[in-house]
Amino acid sequence: MSKVKTRKAAAKRMTLTGTGKIKRRRAGLTHLQSKRSSRTQSRNNNGAQNVSKADYKEALGMLPNAK
C-alpha cells in the first residue's frame, strides 16, 4: 500500500491549530501598503485567518499527516 503524501505547497501555507482549525494567511498584505491608511494597516497587520467551513475538508485532505 502506498504512502499518504502531504501537499507541500499547502503545508507551507497552512498550519493546524491545537483546537483542530486550519490557520492560513490572507492574501494581498505583503506590499503596496503605503496607499492604505494606518488604521487599515493596523487592522490588517495580523493576516492570520481560519480556513472557512466550506474549504475545511479539502484543506484537511491536503494535510493528511497534520492531524
Image (spheres, rainbow, N blue to C red):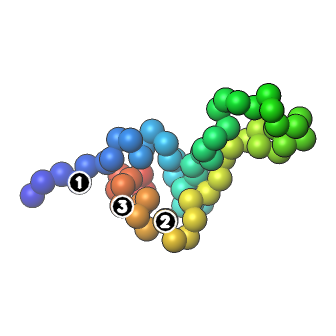
N-term mark: 2 or 3:
2
Q: Name the N-terminal-most of marks 1 and 3.
A: 1
**Residue 36 in sight in this render:** yes
Is disc 2 placed on a helix, strand or loop?
A: helix
* Marks 1 and 3, how far apart at CA: 10 Å
User: Where is residue 19 shown, x and y percent of the image?
Assistant: 60, 60
| Quarter residue 34 falls in | top right
Where does the image place residue 37, in percent across and percent down from the top left? 88, 37
Position above or below: 55 against 15:
below
Which residue ends up furthest to the left in the rendered image? 1
Q: Residue at x 25, y 49 (%)?
A: 5
Between residues 26 and 34, which one lies in front from this camera angle? Answer: 34
- Residue ID for mark 3: 61
56 lies above or below 62: below
Q: Is residue 11 left or right of residue 46?
A: left
Tag 2 and tag 3, C-beta contact below 8 Å: no
Real-space CA distance between mark 2 and mark 3, rounded to the nearest whole angstrom: 10 Å
Q: Amino acid at mark 2?
A: Asp
The residue beneath circle 2 is 55
Foreground pick, 32 / 7: 32
Label 1 CA crowd tier, 10 Å (few <14, some 14–19, many 20+): few
Do the numbered discs 2 and 1 sit on residues whose CB atoms are within 8 Å? no
Question: Disc 3 marks which amino acid?
Answer: Gly
Residue at the image point whose x is 49% and y is 65% from the top: 56
